[in-house]
Image (tube, helix red, strand yellow):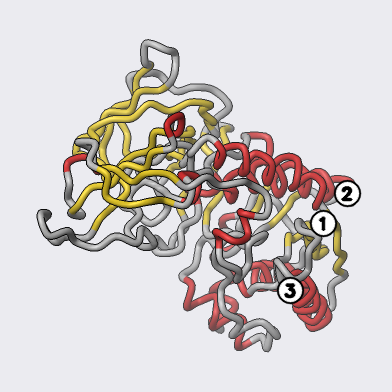
Amino acid sequence: MTMLEKYLAVLENTLTLKPPAKVVVGMSGGVDSAVSAFLLKELGFDVVGLFMKNWEEGEECPAEQDWQDVVQTASRMNIPCFSISFAKQYQDLVFEEFLEELKKGHTPNPDILCNREIKFKHLLAKAQELNAEALATGHYARHGLRDGQHLLLRGLDRNKDQTYFLSAITQEALTHSIFPVGSFLKPDIRKIAEEAKIPVAKKKDSTGICFIGKRDFRPFVGKFLGFTPGKMVTPEGKNVGVHQGVALYTIGQRKGLGIGGTSDGSGDAWFVVGKVVEENLLIVAQGENHPALFKNSLEAEEPSWIAGYEPALPLHCTAKIRYRQEDTPCVVTKSATGNLHVQFEQPQRAITSRQSVVFYLDDVCLGGAFIK
């Protein structure tokens, strides 16, 4: 058995859908979605590539180059591919929400909103219009089934696992979704792409927010929001500098503050530990382990449970408050306000409003909520 045959056997064992069913693959121009399409085609599925354009300004987001990469890749595989614009939907459902939360001094995560509102709603609907039985993407996640319940499982490659970003998708969307690369390690995917001579085999992974691209965050966001400089103060109220607008900073941020160690201070680096938006104050403190950076609990709102219903509370599970973080044991209950109260076993550093807290039971991603 060749290496490719072994990969195909592994993937085939994870799928409930069988060839020659029609599958639309959301192709981004990157290697992960390209290999997803390749593997499904090799298994005998009727594969169609669909490229999303979510931003109109070409200079902001390299959509045209990505589209050309999709065209070349699809041609190599001999599959049809189409481009579709969701720019208006993205503007209304993701970008406007992003700006509104920044105005309030929060730190929103547009990737989670994009997956919920665009990829696994509008793109999935388009796939169904094309009579596809499933939408496949290049996310590092796996799809499980237990007692008729569809489960979102962590990707085999823990360094690439993307269930954090998928934590707000619905049970209905998951039912019609396939994650072909989730059962493999990233080096495996590169190897498959190179052996299959896929044009994007060595293309670098994209990072950051698409609508910002390679531009600096501050000038870009400044085109849409007005910023008012204000005081940087310590938790005790001492004035130590000037910020350029509270929306431009996030809890735990070190770089870009423009203040060094003070003669009467510890000489340690400064970190953002809080905001008082109503007074246009940015709270900063010295030392990466300053007590103001740590909290034992948080409150979260607007929960999304992948099962479609809330689990029995109290829930003993693990959770993470950012993508690049190991899980921490916690207990989830209801707060007095009806939101979720999450009590951690260990203090968490830089808990940030409107980022997501995502819950897990072993490999199962249960869902998440927005930190309040």
Q: In this view, does 324 lie to the left or right of 207?
A: left
* Vertical relation: 77 (above or below) 157: below
Residue denoted by label 3: 66
Could you tell which of marks 1 and 2 lies nearer the N-terminus? 1
Between disc 3 and disc 2, the foreground one is: 3
Most foreground residue, 257 or 310? 257
Say how many tags the image has: 3
Residue shown at the point (61%, 57%) measured from the top left: 179
Which residue lies at the image location 42% right of the left edge and 12% below the top edge?
Answer: 337
Query: Which numbered disc flags the more N-terminal residue, 3 or 2?
Result: 3
Residue type, numbered disc 1 = Lys
**SS for dot 3:** helix
Q: Residues within 10 Å of mark 2 (few under 14, many from 20)?
A: few
Quadrant where the N terminus sits is: bottom right
Q: Which tag, 1 or 3, sits closer to the chain's start?
A: 1
Q: What residue type is labelled 2?
A: Asn
Q: Can residue 1 be seen in this view?
A: no
Residue 329: x percent and y percent?
26, 38
Residue type at the position of mark 3: Asp
Residue 22: mark in rendering? 1
Q: Distance between the residues labelled 1 and 3?
A: 24 Å
Q: Name the residue under label 2.
A: 131
Asked whether disc 1 touches disc 2, contact meaning CB atoms under 8 Å apart, the reply is yes
